[in-house]
Image (cartoon, helix red, strand yellow):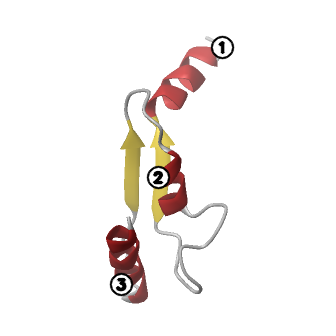
Amino acid sequence: MEETINVICEISDQNLPISIIIVGVGSSDFSSMCRLDADELELKKGVRDIVQFVKFEDIVQDCNDEPD
């Protein structure tokens, strides 16, 4: 996890136009992915939020809840 965070920070520091999207498939515990998403807390001070985590199951549920 720490190695992944360090790589994300390095990429962010380069100010490249990049986004990382992580899709969680299945019923596993994805709490560590929420840390990478950094919506609640910054990974490290001054690091851009370039990671988005989504649970596939949540997206399917949202689509099924939409009216026709």
What is the secondary structure assignment of the residue under circle 1?
Answer: loop
Q: Which residue is mark 1?
A: 67
What is the secondary structure assignment of the residue under circle 3?
Answer: helix
Q: CA distance from mark 3 to mark 1?
A: 43 Å
Q: Earlier in the sequence, mark 3 or mark 1?
A: 3
What amino acid does circle 1 point to? Pro
What amino acid does circle 3 point to? Glu
Q: Contact (CB < 8 A) between labels 3 and 1? A: no
Q: CA distance from mark 2 to mark 3?
A: 18 Å
| Quadrant into which the N terminus falls | bottom left
Q: Earlier in the sequence, mark 1 or mark 2?
A: 2
What residue lies at 49% left-to-right and 43% top-to-bottom?
54
What residue lies at 36% left-to-right and 84% top-to-bottom?
10
Q: Contact (CB < 8 A) between labels 2 and 3? A: no
Which numbered circle lies on residue 33?
2
Q: Which residue is mark 3?
A: 10
**Crowdedness of circle 1 by 10 Å Cα count: few (<14), some, many (20+)?**
few
**Crowdedness of circle 3 by 10 Å Cα count: few (<14), some, many (20+)?**
few
What is the secondary structure assignment of the residue under circle 2?
Answer: helix
- In the depicted structure, whether residue 21 falls above or below residue 66: below
Q: Earlier in the sequence, mark 2 or mark 3?
A: 3
| Quadrant into which the C terminus falls | top right
Which numbered circle lies on residue 2?
none
